Image: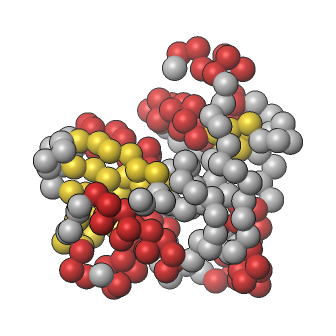
Amino acid sequence: MAVLNLHHYGAPDGAPTLAIHGVTAHGERYRRLAQEAFPERRWLSVDLRGHGRSTWDGPWTVEQHVADLLETLDAEGAERVEVVGHSYGGMIGLHLLATAPDRVARLALLDPAVELPGAWLPKLADETIEDPGWATPEEALAKRLEGRPEQALADATEDVQRHVYLAPDGRYRMRFCRGTESRPSAASSISTRRCKANPPPIERRSSPLWRSA
C-alpha cells in the first residue's frame, strides 16, 4: 500500500496526471485546476511525505519523495503520467523525470524551486521551522490573503479550512511537519526526525470562519 495520501479528481478513465505541490502545501491546492479547468483528466494529487494527511515520518529527501511518488503510481496502476509540479514540487518532478523517464510523458513546471539563491535559503528554512503560527483561524486567513487580490478569498478560505490545525501549544498552523524545511547544517539530523502524529482537522465550531463552509 502506498504511504501518500492521494486526492482523486476528474475522470477515472482520463489521461493520468500527477500533481505535486510545494513545501508547506498539500494536494488539495490543485482541486480547482483539476475540476474547473481540466475535468477530463484523471488527476492524482498527492500530499507529499511530511505534508497534509500523508505520513509525517522522515526522511524527507528528494530521493524519498521520488520513491513515494513511484510507489503511488504503481498502486494506482498508472504506468505513464503527465506531471504538474509547483515550486518544490516542480523540482521533485524534475528528479522524477531523471529517475524514471519512462514514467513521465510530459512535465509542466509552475514557478519551480530550482537555481534559488543560496544565501536566501537558510533564512527561509529558519522562518519556516520557527513559524509561530496564528492565534485564530481568522488571523491565519488574513495572513494568507496578504498581497493577494480579493479574488483569492475563496481559495484562501478553503485552504485554511482544510489545511490549518490547532497545535498542542494552542496556536493554529499549516498542516505540515516543520522538519521538512531544514537548514543544510541540520539536514542530517532533522531529515530523519519523526514528527508528532498527523493532527486532526480543526473543529469547525471553534471559529466563525467555518460558518460558511
Pick the front one: 175 or 200: 200
Rendering quarter of residue 80:
bottom left
The answer to whether residue 34 of the structure is visible from this angle is yes
Side of 48 relative to 15 (left or right):
right
Q: Residue at x 59, y 36 (%)?
A: 160
Q: Is residue 151 above or below residue 54?
A: above
Pick the front one: 212 or 196: 196
Percent from the top left, x then y, of residue 185? 77, 84
Q: Residue at x 60, y 81 (%)?
A: 117
Percent from the top left, x then y, of residue 176? 63, 53
Q: Is residue 200 above or below residue 100?
A: above
Residue farthest toward the right in the current orientation of the protein:
169
Pick the front one: 6 or 205: 6
Q: Residue at x 37, y 52 (%)?
A: 45
Rendering quarter of residue 75:
bottom left
Percent from the top left, x then y, of residue 17? 25, 57
